[in-house]
Image: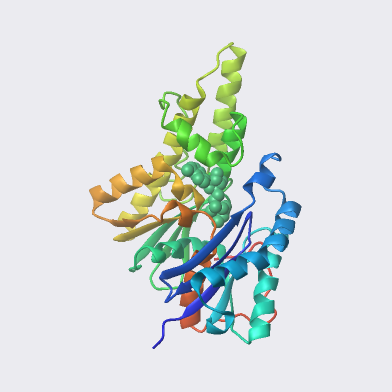
Amino acid sequence: MMKTLILGIETSCDETSAAVVRGGTEILSNVVSSQIESHKRFGGVVPEIASRHHVEQVTYILEQALEEAEVTLDDVDAIAVTEGPGLVGALLVGVNAAKALAFAKNKPLIGVHHIAGHIYANRLVEELEFPLLSLVVSGGHTELVLMNEHGRYEVIGETRDDAVGEAYDKVARTLGLPYPGGPQIDKLAAEGEASIDLPRAWLEADSYDFSFSGLKSAVINTLHNAKQRGEEPAPADVAASFQASVVEVLVGKTMRAVRERGVERLVMAGGVAANRGLREALTGACEEAGVKLTIPPLALCTDNAAMIAAAGAVMYERGEFAGDRLNGEPGLEL
Ligand code: KG4
Ligand code: ZN
């Protein structure tokens, strides 16, 4: 049997991306156009600007993805697109592009959950084995997702307030660092000492949920109080202390879930999986516990369409197609 060829499209936030993936595992192309520069001066993603960028970019990006993969639309088995969650205006650009192509070429259409995509970025690196636990850490999500088979997801823990990436970006802003703040804090943290006492949000003993808003407030209060005393803690120490709290809780809860759920296979997903402190700590904990861990390379951690095509390939095998009424769903559940 020929391996499936899936065209993926991702426009849920501030990257316009199209990709071609073969057999759910092999990237033939993965073109990403980032809008970060356009949003920087506003300190965050401006939805109107994001939609406009997607509209301007999506056709070029699609052409480029097909060209780089050396395939035509006729060769493609299906078109997979991020259905949600995300910014509604941004999602609609991708969904409408996918629908137009599917209609014109009479190809099946697949609606992919953005987080399923982040998880499946790992299958572009190494085959998944079940039961599998995924630590999903992005700008919009912080979740522990358990999987017993392809394409089926059980959320066993999630954030009750801010996503971890959001907390990174807010703390960065407090320190006067440019958007997106995650990579900046990560860099600074490596140069500082975790010398400032900050809380760890463990919540109830049996909970896999997360909370980061208290930590964010604690950082802001610490800076404020220091200022009142005429002191100014070194930004690198603030970054290191904040990151130490985040990493300790993320790794601690993940490894407890691994033990309690009898999982031997772990993957990390989402933009914050690019964080060096987190990668190191989780790698160390997994070595100690004898758990096999996959972390995607940086380019596959942040938003891209290859991960959407990879998740779409599994849905294709399962016959999970979207009708021609597919819509952007900003609050879509996994
Ligand atoms: O997954 P993603 O690209 O977009 C969403 O779906 O949200 O994640 C973006 C988030 C941003 O909050 C960004 O600051 C954070 O990932 N991020 C990082 C790092 N690189 C990106 N956070 C901490 N350390 C990093 N190295
Ligand atoms: Zn994402």
Q: Position of residue 183 (x, y in %)?
A: 51, 40
Q: Residue at x 44, y 42 (%)?
A: 202
User: Residue 130's quadrant in the figure?
Assistant: bottom left
Q: From the viewer's perspective, is residue 293 above or below residue 161? A: below
Q: Is residue 38 left or right of residue 312?
A: right
User: In the figure, 81 relative to 87: above or below?
Assistant: below
Front one among 70 and 312 = 70
Left or right, 2 with reference to 97: left
Q: How many dots with numbers?
A: 0
Q: Which quarter of the image is occupied by the N terminus? A: bottom left
At 44% from the left and 32% from the top, the residue drawn is 189
Q: Quadrant of the C terminus?
A: bottom right
Visible in this render: residue 316? yes
Q: Residue at x 62, y 62 (%)?
A: 85
Q: Residue at x 35, y 47 (%)?
A: 282
Q: Position of residue 296 (x, y in %)?
A: 41, 56
- Along the line of sight, which residue is nearer the eye, 167 or 52? 52
Q: Is residue 186 above or below residue 130?
A: above
**What's the colour scheme?**
rainbow
Percent position of residue 327, x then y: 69, 72
Residue 175 at x, y percent in the picture: 58, 28
Q: Nearer the viewer, residue 305 or 212?
A: 305
Is residue 217 shown above or below 166? above
Q: Is residue 141 visible?
A: no
Looking at the rendering, which quadrant does residue 221 occupy?
A: top right
* 128 to the left or right of 97: left
Closer to the camera in the image, 7 or 163? 7
